[in-house]
Image: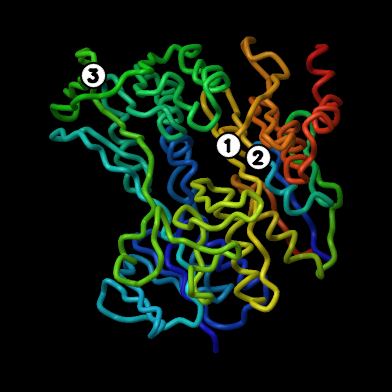
Amino acid sequence: MAKLTADTDLCQGYGNCLTTAEDVYDIDDDGKVVLLTETIPETDRARVEAAARSCPVKALGVVDG
Amino acid sequence: MSTVVIVGASVGGVRTAQALRAQGHDGRIVLVGAEPHLPYDKPPLSKQFLAGAWEHDRLALLTAEEAAADGIELRLGVAATGVDPVARTVELAEGTDLGYDTLVIATGATARPSPWAAESGVHVLRTLTDGTGLRAALAEPGPLVVVGGGFIGAEVAATAHAAGREVTVVDPLPAPIARVLGDEVGRLVGDVHRRHGVETRFGIGVRAVSGRVGALDITLTDGTVLPAGTAVVGIGAVPAVEWLADSGLELDNGLVCDEFCRATGHPEIFGVGDVARWFHAGHGEHVRVEHWTNAVEQAACVAHNVVHPEEPVQYRPTEYAWSDQYDWKIQIAGRPNRATGFELAGDPTTDAPRFAALYRDETGRLSAAVTVNWPKLLVAARRLITAGTPYEEGLSVLDKLIAPVSAA
């Protein structure tokens, strides 16, 4: 399993992460990212890492769980 | 072992390299960059970096350690000067040739140079070197004149204003962002400068710039002379294809590519980011997009198509861009400038506005959205646009988000 991280202080609500992985990331009324799950299986890691790399302010991470 | 050479080490090139590894490419990846710096990110150059809040290290896109961990060979500080598609080599400025099996062209765009000459004190903003120079210039006293009210010009104006500088923005269009948004919504967004006390001279051009740093004269087409300590010229960018002039590749306002981002007649050569003009199958025409998100999304698509040439995926994104100016977070999805009409939601006139323009096209679909300080609505609209949702149906879905705000 890999663990997801999100820094809501950095998050600016650009929303790119939702385009790539809307099953993992959501956005609240204040425009801040919400994690829909805290861990993902290793088989899903490449896709979610791509979503994390689409964040313009580097607010998202995928780390070893 | 198959070698992918990527020319251009900005976000499009870097993300292509990373996505290639993530997609399972196990051959060589060589990333060539003309600038000597490690790959860095450009959006903060007009905002946090210019303001002095962030230093160079906060801009990093790919550290040397990350490159090594992914097996990405960095060839920085050396420009590519040509391509021989028959021999499958890239010529480097240092005089050597670099062989490739697959070539990814991601050289971006360069700032359109100032057509007006002055001794000194006139800046453009595209690269880290530009940004470093402009940041130093902004520390000097004297008014700032920004020529061009597009994204770069508007952001520089907002940043300089926040730093206490006297700022004037000049643009020949009546509502500069109207190029993207149309006149009416463009005016709403253009008003943000005036609301914050930045002087605007919209609808008027620049005739001449003379003098030197600290003592510039910007002469407008009506004869007005604006004194300035520093001037910034933000009048667009041009795709960086001059190095391909003798390559035989098709060049026409960028590197011309098919719907899979492959250069015309060369399935082993791909274009990514600002330099690429590809056939967008959803729009039925070739488009070129100069925005960060496009470079990232196109990089992912190209990496897939390199690794899975037998199952190529069309690249047909919903356009997306953002701009942070003053206390306005402006987000744009789709193609507002192609719309046939729009409706406004929310209130653009308050001190802390939250509003949206929702556009329809000639096919009756929700085709674009522009939001100010409303990320959740933008995300929802972007999804509906991508799904090709009919306009009225899209509005009824978005109404659920809009209603509580309008009622408040």
Label pair 1/2, CB-CB below 8 angstroms: yes
Residue sitting at x 43%, y 41% = B45
In the rendered structure, find residue B231 and report the number of the disc placed on it: none
Label 3 or label 1, whichever lies nearer to me, is 3
Classify mark 1: residues with Cα within 10 Å, few (<14), some (14-19) or many (20+): some
Q: Is residue B58 above or below residue B272?
A: above
Residue at the extreme bottom of the image, as rendered: B1
> Looking at the picture, which amino acid does disc 1 mark?
Trp
In the rendered structure, find residue B221 and report the number of the disc placed on it: 3
Q: Are marks 1 and 2 on the same chain?
A: no
Query: Which chain contains the residue that carries disc 1?
Result: B
Label 2 or label 3, whichever lies nearer to me, is 3
Residue B320, x across and y down, in percent = 61, 42
Query: Which chain contains the residue that carries disc 2?
Result: A
What kind of element bears circle 3?
loop
Q: Write down the residue under mark 2.
A: A14
Q: Are marks 2 and 3 on the same chain?
A: no
Q: Quadrant of the C terminus of chain B?
A: top right
> Closest to the observer: A5 or B224?
B224
Label pair 2/3, CB-CB below 8 angstroms: no
Label pair 3/1, CB-CB below 8 angstroms: no
In the rendered structure, find residue B322 and report the number of the disc placed on it: 1
What kind of element bears circle 2?
loop
Residue sitting at x 42%, y 56% = B254
